């Protein structure tokens, strides 16, 4: 029912011709702050720290990750927008950049607010249940049948109020004819604890949030909403492979204030291009189970606008649009 923006997020190897040469005149002249709209320890934060660890080599300066979780992203995005456009402040954005405009009356930002540097990742959501609970031995079809049989009886943990997990949950319900009882919880880590403790039946979490518990046999993953196998989860099939047409993996990107001069923006675009092509970055991502996906500034702009259209349609259909 809902398309996936398939093909807009592509790997760096497809976008960077072998041996291509790029001139780079600008580099930052001091410590760089990377503002992240989340608390430490979640998928957003893990992505930022893995990226910064490699990007420092090409920036020639330290990159400090600054966590700003307040207001479901509003605090971070407002800080990014108001930063001095001197190239010493980067922002890491995700799908919430476009969904906040639909669901939060105090969100004044959107697809046109920032200058894009490039896409840095794409992560699928994993449908997770406890390995000791009533759904531990079920296939995806059996689990969805159980949910469909008793609407609103099976709980699903979601982080906050209509973040990425809620959009995927809603799309799953529409596609499969199910209806979960949503349980808002602060952060993926607390949702996982709820599953392990038996207080929550299911959730749609990122691979980096559940890898340790998956390897320990404490949780089962019934499906994910990506388009290909995920390293470290080779036995987990996609929803589409199991007959459920569900996409909407989360994308993340780097941005600069809109007024950033061209030479500064181009400098950061080249720094990111080099970083994303570095095998060390791919290894860093693989070690924390972040999905490697790169697009340049123009490609990222197209990705964000397509995402805004798709998620805006879901927002209107779900009746969550704020006037």
Image (cartoon, rainbow, N blue to C red):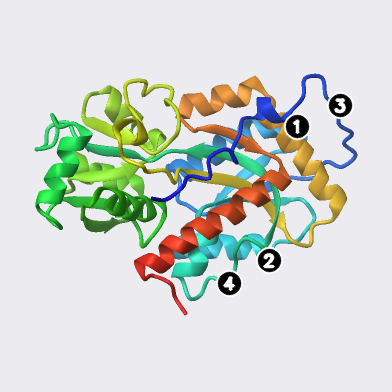
- Residue 108 image label: 4
Contact, mark 1 vs mark 3 (Cβ under 8 Å): no
Q: Residues within 10 Å of mark 4 (few under 14, many from 20)?
A: few
Secondary structure, mark 1, is helix
- Dot in front, 3 or 2: 3
Can you say whether 289 is above or below 308 in the image? above
Q: CA distance from mark 2 to mark 4?
A: 12 Å
Query: Residue 272: horizontal and vertical position, in percent?
Result: 71, 37
Q: CA distance from mark 1 to mark 4?
A: 33 Å
Residue at 35%, 52% in the rendered image: 171
For this orientation, the residue located farthest to the bottom is 323
Q: Which residue is mark 1?
A: 58
Query: Residue 60: horizontal and vertical position, in percent?
Result: 77, 34
- Residue 82 image label: 2
Q: CA distance from mark 3 to mark 4?
A: 39 Å
Q: Residues within 10 Å of mark 3 (few under 14, many from 20)?
A: few
Residue at 29%, 32% in the rendered image: 242
Q: Earlier in the sequence, mark 3 or mark 4?
A: 3
Q: Closest to the observer: 165 or 139?
A: 139
Residue 11 left/right relative to 102: right
Q: Earlier in the sequence, mark 2 or mark 4?
A: 2
Q: Closest to the observer: 62 or 263?
A: 263
Residue at 83%, 24% in the rendered image: 20
Q: Which residue is mark 3?
A: 21
């Amino acid at each position: 029912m809902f398309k996936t923006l398939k093909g807009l997020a592509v790997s760096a190897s497809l976008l960077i011709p072998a041996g291509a040469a790029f001139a780079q005149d600008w580099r930052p002249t001091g410590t760089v702050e990377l503002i992240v709209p989340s608390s430490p320890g979640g998928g957003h934060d893990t992505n930022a720290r893995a990226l910064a660890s490699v990007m420092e080599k090409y920036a020639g300066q330290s990159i400090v990750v600054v966590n700003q979780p307040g207001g479901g992203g509003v605090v971070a995005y407002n800080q990014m927008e108001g930063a001095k456009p001197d190239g010493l402040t980067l922002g890491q954005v995700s799908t919430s950049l476009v969904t906040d405009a639909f669901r939060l009356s105090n969100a004044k930002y959107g697809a046109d607010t920032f200058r894009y540097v490039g896409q840095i990742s794409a992560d699928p959501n994993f449908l997770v249940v406890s390995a000791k609970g009533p759904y531990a031995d079920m296939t995806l079809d059996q689990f969805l049948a159980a949910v469909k049989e008793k609407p609103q009886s099976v709980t699903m943990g979601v982080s906050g109020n209509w973040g990425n997990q809620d959009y995927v949950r809603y799309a799953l319900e529409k596609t499969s004819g199910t209806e979960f009882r949503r349980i808002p919880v602060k952060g993926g880590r607390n949702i996982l604890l709820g599953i392990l403790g038996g207080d929550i039946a299911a959730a749609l979490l990122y691979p980096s949030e559940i890898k340790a518990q998956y390897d320990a046999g404490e949780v089962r993953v019934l499906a994910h909403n990506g388009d290909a196998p995920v390293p470290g989860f080779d036995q987990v099939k996609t929803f589409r492979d199991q007959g459920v047409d569900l996409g909407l993996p989360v994308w993340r990107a780097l941005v600069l204030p809109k007024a950033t001069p061209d030479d500064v923006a181009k400098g950061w675009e080249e720094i990111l291009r080099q970083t994303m092509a570095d095998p060390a970055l791919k290894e860093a991502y693989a070690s924390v189970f972040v999905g490697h996906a790169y697009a340049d500034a123009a490609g990222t702009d197209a990705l964000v606008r397509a995402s805004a259209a798709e998620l805006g349609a879901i927002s209107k259909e779900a009746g969550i649009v704020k006037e």
